[in-house]
Amino acid sequence: MNAVRSEMRRAREAQSMTFDVLAKRCATLGYEISRVVLSKIEGGYRPDVTLPELLVIARALNVGPAQLVTPLGTADQVELLPDVALSPLEAWTWFAGQALPTGMAGDLPSDAAREDAEVFLELARPAGFWLRHERLEREWVAVATEAQTLGLDRADEVELIARRQRPIATELLSLRRQCERLGVTVPPVSDEALARSLDALGSLSDFDLGGEMYRSRRGALP
C-alpha cells in the first residue's frame, strides 16, 4: 500500500490534479470513487485498495496499474506480500508475469522453490509467446523503415529489406507453430506484407524452418 499511496500522490501532483478532479475522472470512466475515499487512500487512512479501484485510479491518473504497485525509478524497495521486500524491478517482473523473484520463496525448501519457479514460467508461456510475437513484428517493420534512410537505389533497398526481414519472418512462423502445438491462441498479424511473407514461408517443414533459423543466426544466409 505504501507504494500505491506514494505513486498516486506523485502522479496526481505532477498533473496538478485535485481530488475533486480525480474523482470526476474516475466517475467518467464508469467507476465512482469519492474525493474523500481517494484522499483516505493516498493519506494512508484506508487499509487497502480493491482491484477495480486500482485500475480506475491508474487510468484516471494516466499511469499504468503496475507503476502504482511497483514504482520503478522512484523507490528502493516495495512490499507486495507480508514481510517480502523486493526491488521495484523484481516486483515489476513478477507483476508482469516475467519471473518469480527468488526473494518470494520465503521459508520454502530449495526444491519446492525451484518447482514453483518452473510452474510459474510454464503458466506464463502464453503471455511470453504474445510479447515475443509483438516484438518480432515491430522488428520486421523497422527493417523497412531503417532501410529507407540509407539512400540506396530502389533495387538495392528492396534486396536489403528482403534479406533482413526473412530471418525475422522465419522466427515468427516458428513461434506461431509453437503456439498451435501447445494450444495457445495464435496472435493476429497486423501488417499485410508480413502476413503475405508468412504465407509464402508456410510450405517450409519444421525441419527446414529450423535449419534456416540456425543459418540466419550464424550469418550464413545470403
Image (spheres, helix red, strand yellow):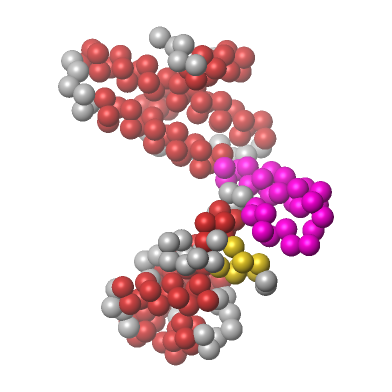
Residue 17 % position (x, y): 31, 79
Residue 8 % position (x, y): 43, 75
Range of magenta residues: 100-128
In the rendered structure, does residue 119 fall within the stretch colored magenta? yes
48 horizontally vs 68: left or right = right
**Does the rendering let one see residue 25?**
no
Residue pictured at 72% horizontal, 45% vertical: 118
Residue pictured at 68% horizontal, 60% vertical: 104
Residue pictured at 56% horizontal, 71% vertical: 51
Viewer-side residue, 35 vs 150? 150
Viewer-side residue, 160 vs 192? 160
> Magenta-highlighted stretch: main secondary structure?
helix
Residue 178 % position (x, y): 62, 30
**Does the rendering let one see residue 186?**
yes
Residue pictured at 44% horizontal, 86% vertical: 39
Residue 12 % position (x, y): 35, 76
Image quarter where the N terminus lies is bottom right
In the rendered structure, does residue 120 fall within the stretch colored magenta? yes
